[in-house]
Amino acid sequence: MAEEQKAQEEQKKPKEGGLGTIIPEVETFSLGGIECKIRRLKFRETLMLWRIIASAGKRIPWSNIQNLNPTTLTATLLFAIPHAEREFYDFLKAIVDYPEDKEKQIRAYIDQELENEEIMGLIKILIEQEKDSWQKLGEQIKQIAQVFDRKK
């Protein structure tokens, strides 16, 4: 029994990958009365997120991007959403896991009925789940930048 419990605990532990934790525990939340989860971002969803952020162009304090921490990332994302509203909703639909029989309902709810508190809650969960991998990504970006700085 103890070995089975230990094996279950091992399965719950995050797995390490190239940019950090890739298999996390996710938080359950209610969206339009339906229990959902935000899954960890895969590369495609990360690109979607960066496209949203990049859409704001010069309106974003890009100097903060090198400091990938939850606060600067949240602020940057919030500043970018008005410039990529459709992309943001598509991004949410891509990262929210929901019961298969509720797909049409959830997608319509995301498109038309999200409340401010729900959007902020989704962003909070996303940032909390991804912060470690984004901080590691920030460190890797700094390391790459240092390589280019040395070549000057």
Image (spheres, rainbow, N blue to C red):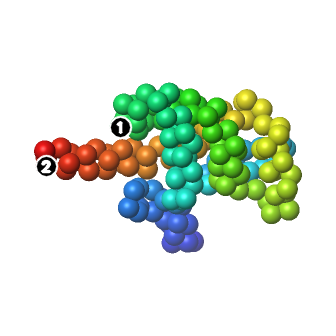
Reading the image, the residue beneath label 2 is 151
Instruction: Work out whether residue 128 can be spotted.
Output: no
Q: Please state if 114 lies on the left or on the right of 16 as rendered.
A: right
Image coordinates for residue 82, horizontal then vertical, percent: 64, 32
Q: Amino acid at mark 1?
A: Gln
Image coordinates for residue 109, horizontal then vertical, percent: 83, 44
Compared to 75, does 12 lie above or below? Answer: below
Q: Residues within 10 Å of mark 2 (few under 14, many from 20)?
A: few
Q: Nearer the viewer, residue 36 or 110?
A: 110
Q: Nearer the viewer, residue 28 or 137?
A: 137
Q: Nearer the viewer, residue 143 or 135?
A: 143
In three-dimensional space, the C-alpha distance between marks 2 and 1, rounded to whole angstroms, equals 20 Å
Q: Which mark is residue 66?
A: 1
> In the rendered view of the protein, which quadrant contains the N terminus?
bottom right
Q: Residues within 10 Å of mark 1 (few under 14, many from 20)?
A: some
Q: Earlier in the sequence, mark 2 or mark 1?
A: 1
Query: Which residue does the image show at 85% across and 56% down from the upper left?
Result: 104
Secondary structure, mark 1, is: helix
> In the rendered view of the protein, which quadrant contains the C terminus?
top left
Secondary structure, mark 2, is: loop
Q: Amino acid at mark 2?
A: Lys
Image coordinates for residue 143, horizontal then vertical, percent: 25, 48
